[in-house]
Amino acid sequence: MLQKNLLHFLSDKKELDIASIYKHLNITIPKEKKNVQHYLKQWKQYGAININLKKGTIKIIDLSLCTSHSNAAPRHTKPILTAGKVEDDFTLIKDRYSLPEKFSFGATQEIKEKIWGKSQDTYRQDLKKEFIITIDGEDSKDLDDAISIQKHFFGKWTLGVHIADVSYYVPQNSILDKEAYKRANSYYFINKVIPMLPKELSNDLCSLNPKENKRTLSIFITFNKNGEVLKYNIIPTWICSHYRLTYQKVQAIMNNQTETDPVLQKNINLMKEFYKILYKKRINNGSIDFNFKERKIILDKNGNPTKIYQKDRLDSERLIEEFMLSANQAVGDFLTKKKLGLFRIHDTPPPEKYKDLKKFAAKLGVKLPDIPRPQDIQLFLASLETSPLKMSGEVLVLRSMAQAVYHRENIGHFGLSFPLYAHFTSPIRRYADLVVHRLIKFFLFSSHNAKQPYTENELDKIAQHISAQERIAMEAERDFFKIKAARYMKPYEGQEFAGIISSIANFGIFVEMEGTGIEAMIRYAAMNDYMIFDEENLLAKNKRGTKIYRLGNKVRIRITKINMERCFIDAEFIHP
């Protein structure tokens, strides 16, 4: 993607300055004079929009601020604000991706009028006295999931996963529903959230806050001692969460580092024991598990970053992950049997991407099959555990993967090695889960001849839309991190850092600075050498071959420039 500033060409002349436009777009002007349509087509490919030849107006919009390493064509066409003021950071991203922050009058009015009914409550089972807890991040306010556990004789277990019954409060085709569909998910920006639902719902009525009676859709799954599913049951329920716990608090309990309620201690110990059974089974079945560190940013009240660091995943986080995966698998099975659903699918690696991984593995003496199984990828990664090329292999595996999306037809989830999988556990922040809840309720309670809540064509349309919105959310959240990372590094211009080569492209080398997850770029053009990019082997080398840079190499760099308008962190290598 081109790196260019926000430019506006406003002209009253009949003939526009073609040469200037090509110059600012940073593309070569055709030697032969072309017709107007050719110019327009080419300009649009590079971000030029709102073209009105009669008025002589062309707007060229920069869509490259804080871009990733992708070469994908621009998709968003909102003007970008300057990144000069910290108070504009959130607005910049919001406008760039056309994210709707405020809800309509109609949506808020529906909440005031309490458009939801009480008819479904007659089906609810009362679990308010059951020992049920939530475990979330410290700052989380939209608590959609709660859990309970029972250990039986002969090694059997019953896992209870209790999910906020958002579909009760958001009737299908209501204004609330239409706005939730448009957003498709919540957007998280460190210290700000653009919720899929108004806060009256997401943080209050639907959120499973402690000591409050809440409507939920619960799934109880019975397992044998090896973590294999014996049966499951989905029912609408009332719950009252006993504790609102954080991952840090639960980790301390798991490590016996804090005194707590004996009943809570007992339940956490049981959950810890059972999650390890589930995790072992999933890995043995071939699930691909990347153990990447999470990047965290601490902001002050004005939005200035005060600390950036990386953290390992806690066992308490893995516990919740395993329990949610189990619930989502069971729901995937339920919908498959009903022959109508919205599934979370992950296809096998596309051949054009997979071939590079296959070549790389062959050079290391590992023969990958033409059509891989998840187990093949998992074993390959395990073979690299102590290799200096571990990072190169992990990057190639990630690049070889298809993108996980939503789809009406289930083909399984390759990365997780699940034959059946749907999203059920986060209806406050994901529209897919809300659709799944409606389908479940229809199959549980509707008569045989009742009209289905969604047609196949409607599910196809929903799947396509929410998959696209999910990608936008990921890009927007990543860009917000890059803005804050650039702000954090600005005072460190001229200083040295240890790092590891995290990516190599045809224009430069990216280095992830130790302990932060922040990337700086060393451009080939700024290096006092002629550099060659070897894409097949994921390395860069000088023409003489005396300097070779590989993924995973430990290096030292000096920050040379922080460009706040583009969120670039430029650096140079420090050679001994």
Image (cartoon, rainbow, N blue to C red):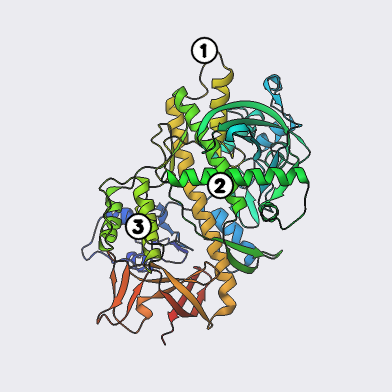
**CA distance separating discs 3 and 2:** 55 Å
Q: CA distance from mark 1 to mark 2?
A: 41 Å
Q: Is residue 181 visible?
A: yes
Q: Is the residue under label 2 in contact with that under label 1 (CB below 8 Å)? A: no
Q: Is residue 122 left or right of residue 90?
A: right
| Labels 3 and 1: the sequence-earlier one | 3
Q: Which mark is residue 43?
A: 3
Q: Residue at x 73, y 41 (%)?
A: 209
Q: Residue at horizontal 73%, vertical 40%?
A: 204
- Please, which residue is most extreme toward the left here? 32
Give the amino acid at mark 1: His
Q: Does any portion of residue 37 appear in the rendered image? A: no
Q: State which quarter of the image contains the N terminus.
A: bottom left
How much space separates mark 3 and mark 1, taking CA atoms?
56 Å
Look at label 2 and name its amino acid. Lys
Residue 409 in the image: x percent, y percent?
A: 40, 31
Quarter assignment of residue 134: top right
Q: In the image, what residue occupies the spot 44% across and 84% down? A: 574
Q: Nearer the viewer, mark 1 or mark 2?
A: 2
Local crowd size for mark 2, using a 10 Å CA cut-off: few (<14), some (14–19), many (≥20)? some
Which residue does the image show at 79% across and 39% down from the upper left?
Answer: 211
Task: Say what secondary structure mark 1 lies in.
Answer: loop
> Secondary structure beneath disc 2?
helix
| Residue named by callout 1 | 448
Mark 3 and mark 1 residues within 8 Å of each other at the beta carbon:
no
> Where does the image place residue 528, in percent across and percent down from the top left?
34, 84
For mark 2, what is the residue? 276
**532 with respect to 171 (left or right):** left
Q: Which mark is residue 293?
A: none
User: Dot 3: within a 10 Å radius of its alpha carbon, few (fewer than 14), some, or many (20 or more) residues?
Assistant: some
Q: Amino acid at mark 3?
A: Trp
